[in-house]
Image (cartoon, rainbow, N blue to C red):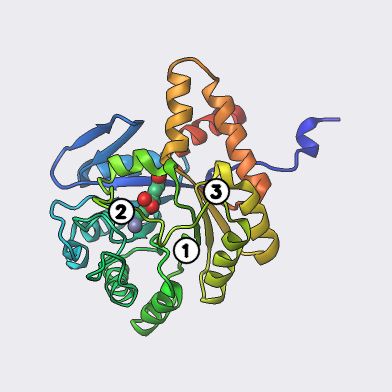
Amino acid sequence: MSRDLVREHSVSVNDLIFPLFVVRGENVKIAVESMPDIYQMSIDNILRECDELLELGINSVILFAIPAHKDAMGSEALQKDSLISRTIQQIKSHYPSLFIVTDLCFCEYTDHGHCGILDEKTTIDNDKSLEILNKQALVHAHAGADMIAPSGMLDGVIASLRNCLDGAGYKHIPIMSYSTKFASAYYGPFRDIAESSPSHGDRKTYQMDYANGNEALSESVEDMRQGADILMVKPALAYLDVVASIKQTTKMPLAVYNVSGEYAMVKLASKHNLLDYEKIVMENMIAFKRAGADIIITYHAKDVAKFLHSTTS
Ligand code: PBG
Ligand code: ZN
């Protein structure tokens, strides 16, 4: 019997979301040492990249902007003509069919690198942070974002955002919640590319302890109750048990974020000929699907698309 006939899972370009990092300037393309083949790009190069993505059949991106100016309040995130707004508008005017997700958080915008504003005790002020996240979401929605993805895991953020978006006429914009996000060393390379390392302390007060599987499930269930349209587990590879339990319990659309450290390990090992890049990447992608993921956010997306095209043609 053909193995293909009884194969239980497959991956398709429709499952993939590719992360893009935008910086100010013209014709900028800066390599990131810890993430081979991933670049910070100015808007003109981001547009070229979008063209290539669509050629490859990848129809979704998640956008991160690296602001020129950071302060305690992350004020650049709230400007109407901010880098991210201009990027969204430019992509939408050139490539209207490309689905744009925006990462909604303050850690890229604050000089202290935490995911919201801090109170005097240098912990996150939850209520004040929810308020500015709502404003940030409206900036993204107004610019034309198709989906908002809050990544800071603040208490009550999904209900607060849903309420705000609905009230402003954006009922149709879905929310993909970073609903189960672990405090993880796998984000190391991302913090280089997004220039978002906390200057002091860590994110343990609002990211989860990787020792806790039940709590991981209840965090996602809570975001579903608050109205999230898509749930997420981040990182992916070391957390497939969590992916499976969230999928079985919630039956919700579920994303995994195959994060920077996971990408760097595979990419660098294969650059040293220690493993077969194509085989490892496809094995990981299928493992995400088998565990229950519907959507895979991955820096490998372009490579996956190329591998898929070469096996089907
Ligand atoms: C926060 C955010 C992070 C990542 C995605 N969104 C960094 C963090 O939580 O510290 C990590 C993604 C990766 O490692 O690839 N805006
Ligand atoms: Zn953050």
In the image, which is nearer the foreground, mark 2 or mark 1?
2
| Label 1: few (<14), some (14–19) or many (≥20) C-alpha neighbours in 10 Å | many
Q: Which mark is residue 201?
A: 2
Three-letter amino acid code at the position of disc 1: Ser
Three-letter amino acid code at the position of disc 3: Asp
Which residue is painted at 28% across and 61% down in the image? Answer: 106
Q: Are marks 2 and 1 in contact (CB under 8 Å)?
A: no
Q: Are marks 1 and 3 in contact (CB under 8 Å)?
A: no
The foreground one among 43 and 159 is 159
N-terminal of the two: label 1 or label 3?
3
The foreground one among 140 and 305 is 140
Q: Would residue 299 be found to the left or right of residue 236 on screen?
A: left
Q: Which residue is mark 1?
A: 177
The foreground one among 25 and 190 is 190
N-terminal of the two: label 3 or label 2?
3
Q: Which residue is mark 3?
A: 15
Q: Residue furthest bottom?
A: 167
Residue 257 location (% of width, % of height): 49, 48
